[in-house]
Image (cartoon, coloured by chain):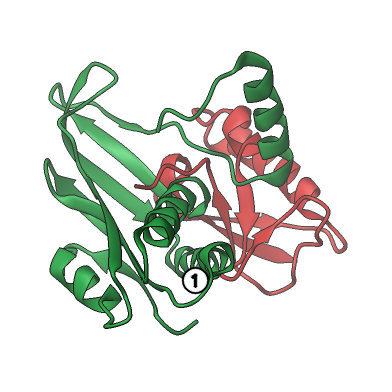
Amino acid sequence: MDGLHVAVVDIRETKLDIAAALDFVYDPRFGGIASFIGRVREHNLGRIVTGITYDLFEPLALNTFRAIGEKARDEVGEPLKLYIAHAKGDLGIGDPAVIVAAGTPHRDEAFRACRLAIEAVKHEAPIWKQEHYIDGDSAWSEGCSLCEEQRESELQRQGETGHGHAH
Amino acid sequence: MKTRIALYGALRDADPSGHVDLDVPAGCDIAGLRQLLIRHLRQHAPGIGAGLVERSAFASAEEILHDARSVPEGVELAVLPPVSGG
């Protein structure tokens, strides 16, 4: 898809570039630019976090990002420019972990495309977060199953209990 | 046939090499592969619960492979625990 930039950024080599994302989605036809930046925060579920390690299955993550781009285009239509980049490796507090930016003629499509993309990155892309805590302990975050059969039963359970996604 | 399965996220703790090699009978589907992996981990990585593998997906570099799919021959697969990007 034209107008789509996807990347996995190994932060040993370089950092995520917010300015590059905004430049990519700029277009003289566009009056609306929406962006989302996910940064590492210093606490989770009552524990003090000192950093996060992101693990990715890179080829499938990039395929998933491209599929998300197609889905966003189907949802909001043309013209759309979309930028999706996720960090890989060891991040400190405040480091950007994910950047999504969307450019469209008007704000409504930009917000919708950006929201759709970040939610899909969080719930569908093969990415795992390991949190490191101040006491020296580490733990992989609970997440969303990509296994179709499990997803169906989890969605059913959420429907019964009213539980949504907290992450 | 031998099938190599790359490990990600919490499943990396199952083997420091980052993968496991399983003997997979011809015609085996992904549901069968899941049971083979559960059996393998019970023996070689008892700290990994069967529940984690049950919630995990199997994939090639191109796509998720659902339970009814046959295990492709000569292709390295990956086992993907529940995801938590962003």
- In-image side of A126 versus A36 (left or right): right
**Chain letter, red:** B
Q: Is residue B57 visible?
A: yes
Q: Chain of mark 1?
A: A
What is the quadrant of residue B27 in the picture?
Answer: bottom right
Q: Colour of chain A?
A: green
Q: Residue at x 27, y 57 (%)?
A: A35
- In-image side of B56 versus A103 (left or right): right
Q: Which residue is mark 1?
A: A66
| Dot 1: element | helix
Q: Residues within 10 Å of mark 1 (few under 14, many from 20)?
A: some
Q: Residue at x 74, y 69 (%)?
A: B72
Q: Is A34 situated above or below A26?
A: above
Q: Residue at x 20, y 76 (%)?
A: A23
Q: Is B26 situated above or below A39?
A: below
Q: Residue B56's x, y, as percent?
A: 60, 42
Q: Is A165 situated above or below A110?
A: above
Q: Is residue B17 visible?
A: no
- In-image side of A123 versus A23 (left or right): right
Look at the image and tell me in which quarter the C terminus of chain A lies.
Answer: top left
Type of the residue with mark 1:
Arg
Q: Is A159 situated above or below A72?
A: above
